[in-house]
Image (cartoon, rainbow, N blue to C red):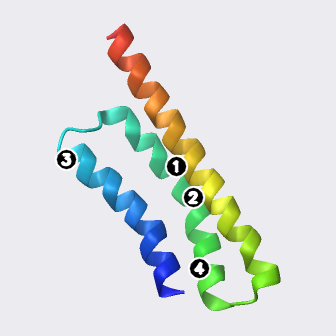
Amino acid sequence: MILFNVLMYGSYLTIIVGWIAGIYQWPIVVTFVSLLKVYPQTKVFTEKQIKSQTFAMSIKNLVAFNSCYGLGLLLTLLWQVLG
């Protein structure tokens, strides 16, 4: 339970550190839109540990985060090419 939360929110921390370090540019902040879906599901996951009910939440979190992350990278690429 704790490991799941650390890994999930650590992904966002990694993006913040990468942004501060100059690895990412500003369009990567679109990744944080996924928190609107990830946070409530992570909260439910933490409260009840019933694999049949919560496993799908972890997959949904993965899809939400990676979709927004991919979109952020795509927007960064477009920003670099067009800007």
| Residue at (62% x, 61% y) in the render | 61
Q: Of label 2 and label 4, which has the lower sequence position?
A: 2
Q: Of label 4 and label 3, which has the lower sequence position?
A: 3
CA–CA distance in space, label 4 to label 3: 28 Å
* Kind of residue sitting beneath label 4: Lys
Label 4 packing within 10 angstroms: few (<14), some (14-19), many (20+) = few
User: Circle 4 sits in a helix, a strand or a loop, which is it?
Assistant: helix
Q: Which residue is mark 1?
A: 33
Q: Which residue is mark 3?
A: 20
- Mark toward the viewer: 4 or 3: 3
User: Where in the figure is residue 45, as x and y percent of width and height?
Assistant: 64, 81
Looking at the figure, which quarter contains the C terminus? top left
CA–CA distance in space, label 1 to label 2: 6 Å
User: Circle 3 sits in a helix, a strand or a loop, which is it?
Assistant: helix
CA–CA distance in space, label 2 to label 4: 12 Å
Q: Which residue is mark 4?
A: 43
| Residue at (76% x, 84% y) in the render | 51
